[in-house]
Image (cartoon, helix red, strand yellow):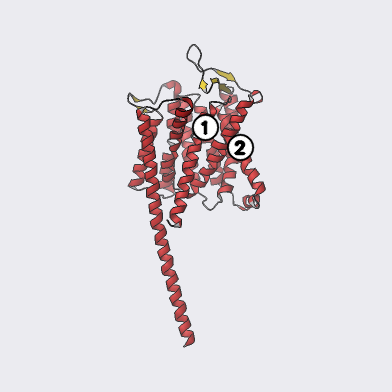
Amino acid sequence: MNQQAKYKLIGFIMMFASSSLMGGIGAFTRFIDAPGDFVSFWRNFAGLIALSLIFCFVGGSWKKIKETRFSGMMLLSGVFLGLLSGLYCLSTQYTTLANASFLIYTGPIYSTILAAIFLKEKLNIKGVLCIAAVVVGMLFIVGIVTPEGLTLDLDPKYTFGNAIAFASGVAYGLYLFFSRYREDCDSNVRSWWNFLFGSLSIVVLLVWHHFFLQPLSYTEKVNGVTQFDASGQIITHAWNMFTMPGSSWVVLIAAALITGFGAFYLLTHATKRLKAGELAAISYQETIMASLLGLFMFGETMTTFQIIGGALIVCGGVAQIFFSTAAASKQGEKIEKEEEIRENLEARLDQEQEREALS
């Protein structure tokens, strides 16, 4: 395997690890007595703190940040990183979980289309089929497509929540799209800016949510299971950061470091190595991890359609990895041959010059 193929394969491994870590956020939040958007804030802010501490021990890191030319694309990728998770968490309070999950997962499709239009990233028929497979798999695994039909709920009472969920999907797509710019930027520097602006954007969401929508609250849970009252409504309580249980803080910090710092840091590195279509084909691994954690940690059964959906996501992702690395390998071989030809020509020229000098 040549360097081009290795570079691409490492990108896929990073994206796979990132999406797998992201899939764990649902399991963590079941044991955190805090609003979802506050959890989202810590996923970014913990990354900012962790990376800043690392920079303090790695010489030259802060200097590299100062020397790197800042641009609007770096600002936008950070803002949309925060909005994609913050808006999704907010949407789950105003629409069904199936609606919210489906609409945020439309994001990779938007990024693929935008990259094809503005960045001229070509997507062949193999890539289209891979993305189609994982999208269909996502529809199965999040429960939008079931044996009984479609479950997407378009009830007018969910209009606001659906709009917020749609905005989270747009934010997801724009994050992936804008991250494809500035490939010259060091990924650690890019991650630091992403965490900073992601945290700030969620602070704005928190203020908007608390003062203009409804006071922040959290869902009552027992052993990770949401509690309902006699009328079937979810039980919620007013939230205060200063009265949060110590156990919630421990789980929150763990969730922030694993599903925030770890996942988003790897995602930033992956976006530098992979095209938008390649990122899209692997991003839906997150839904498989969420389903598996629900199965093993909470005894939630997976339907036949969900198992089929998971298989489609795996097949589409593996196929994309195979096709992309094979193409990168061919490109690498072509580059190596061109370099070999150039070196041979230069050697011949040197020999001819030596002969002329001797004569």
- Residue 163: x, y in percent? 46, 29
Q: Is residue 122 visible?
A: no
Identify the disc placed on residue 25: 1
The residue wearing badge 2 is 46
Residue sitting nearer the eye, 108 or 317? 317
In the figure, is residue 113 to the left or right of 257?
Answer: left
- Residue 46: x, y in percent? 61, 37
- Looking at marks 2 and 1 on the same chain, the residue that comes earlier in the sequence is marked by 1
Q: What amino acid does circle 2 point to? A: Ala
In the figure, is residue 3 to the left or right of 75?
Answer: left
59, above or below 77, in the image: below
Label 2 crowding class (10 Å Cα cut-off): few <14, some 14-19, many 20+? many
Residue at point 44%, 42% (across, down): 111
- Residue 235: x, y in percent? 53, 17
Residue sitting nearer the eye, 166 or 266? 266
The image quarter in which residue 153 lies? top left
At mark 1, the secondary structure is: helix
